[in-house]
């Protein structure tokens, strides 16, 4: 067993006679240190976010930055469905889905035989998934459900119009199919509605 270290501190104290000193001593015990056993408690590691939660956080930060870049900047408390609609149209410039316009010879063809000058847009499935994540993030960050601009009926109408136009322009049906029994083979259609998360690139103005 290790013994405690001792430090003796001697101090002077005035005595009865002039010039006489009587010494007193104080003993302080210091516990021995053991660097091998004295360790800091482990720092808890925060749980890793799922892919959906990570994407939702990025989308929320992107939308917040979009509002800050407006002239004048728009506080989140004053955001309404019009700002959301403008944000969705703004994202079209970063789209990767070819949407044929009326007058294009490939309008309505799911697999056009050649290139054309029609613009690239955000796919309807990507926008629909984006709105779902932003609707949830709004309420998770303190927004009231009744004031949620992402749940506005105008947003649903816009998404439905985008879906219908892209379906005609690309010759793709976005109608939901009924679930089949497990005994039947699963449908393997290349034109199925995509619901994968899309990371939107953002440029500050």
Image (tube, rainbow, N blue to C red):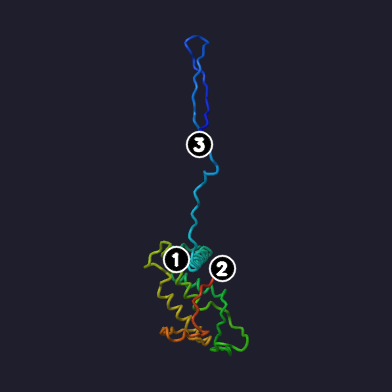
Q: Secondary structure at mark 2?
A: loop
Q: Is residue 48 above or below residue 9?
A: below
How far across and how far down the image is residue 164, in percent?
Answer: 47, 84
**Looking at the image, which is closer to me, 73 or 185?**
185
Q: Secondary structure at mark 1?
A: helix
Residue at screen point 39% across, 67% down: 147
**Looking at the image, which is closer to me, 82 or 9?**
9
How far across and how far down the image is residue 117, in percent?
Answer: 61, 83
**Looking at the image, which is closer to me, 42 or 191?**
42
Mark 2, other Cα within 10 Å: few <14 / some 14–19 / many ≥20 = few
Mark 1, other Cα within 10 Å: few <14 / some 14–19 / many ≥20 = some
Is the Cβ of the residue at disc 3 closer than 8 Å to that at disc 1? no
Q: CA distance from mark 2 to mark 1?
A: 18 Å
How far across and how far down the image is residue 101, in percent?
Answer: 55, 85
Residue at screen point 52% across, 24% down: 9
Q: Secondary structure at mark 3?
A: loop
Mark 2 and mark 1 lie on one chain; the one further toward the N terminus is: 1
Mark 2 and mark 3 lie on one chain; the one further toward the N terminus is: 3
Residue farthest along the bottom direction in this orientation? 105
Q: Which numbered mark, 2 or 1, is in the foreground of this view? A: 1
Q: Which residue is mark 2?
A: 202
Q: CA distance from mark 3 to mark 1?
A: 59 Å
Q: Is residue 18 above or below residue 116?
A: above
Q: Which residue is mark 1?
A: 137
Q: Is residue 21 visible?
A: yes
Q: Which residue is mark 3?
A: 1
Is the Cβ of the residue at disc 2 closer than 8 Å to that at disc 1? no
Q: Which numbered mark, 2 or 3, is in the foreground of this view? A: 3
Residue farthest along the front direction in this orientation? 1
How far across and how far down the image is residue 197, in percent?
Answer: 51, 72
In the picture, the disc for residue 83 is: none
Mark 3 and mark 1 lie on one chain; the one further toward the N terminus is: 3
């Amino acid at each position: 067993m290790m013994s405690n270290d001792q430090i003796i501190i001697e101090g002077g104290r005035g005595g009865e006679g002039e010039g006489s000193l009587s010494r007193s001593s104080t003993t302080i015990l210091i516990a021995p240190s053991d660097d091998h056993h004295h360790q800091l408690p482990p720092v808890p590691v925060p749980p890793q976010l799922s892919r959906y939660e990570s994407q939702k956080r990025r989308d929320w930060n992107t939308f917040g930055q979009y509002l800050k870049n407006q002239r004048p900047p728009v506080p989140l408390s004053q955001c309404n469905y019009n700002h959301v609609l403008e944000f969705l149209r703004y994202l079209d410039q970063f789209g990767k889905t070819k949407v044929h316009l009326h007058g294009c010879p490939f309008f309505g063809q799911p697999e056009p035989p050649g290139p054309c000058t029609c613009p690239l847009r955000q796919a309807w499935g990507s926008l629909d998934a984006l709105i779902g994540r932003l609707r949830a993030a709004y309420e998770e960050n303190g927004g009231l459900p009744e004031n949620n601009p992402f749940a506005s009926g105008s947003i649903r109408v816009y998404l439905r119009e985008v879906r219908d136009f892209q379906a005609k322009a690309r010759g793709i049906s976005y109608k939901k199919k009924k679930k089949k029994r497990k005994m039947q083979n699963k449908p393997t259609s290349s034109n199925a509605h995509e619901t994968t998360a899309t990371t939107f690139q953002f440029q500050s103005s």
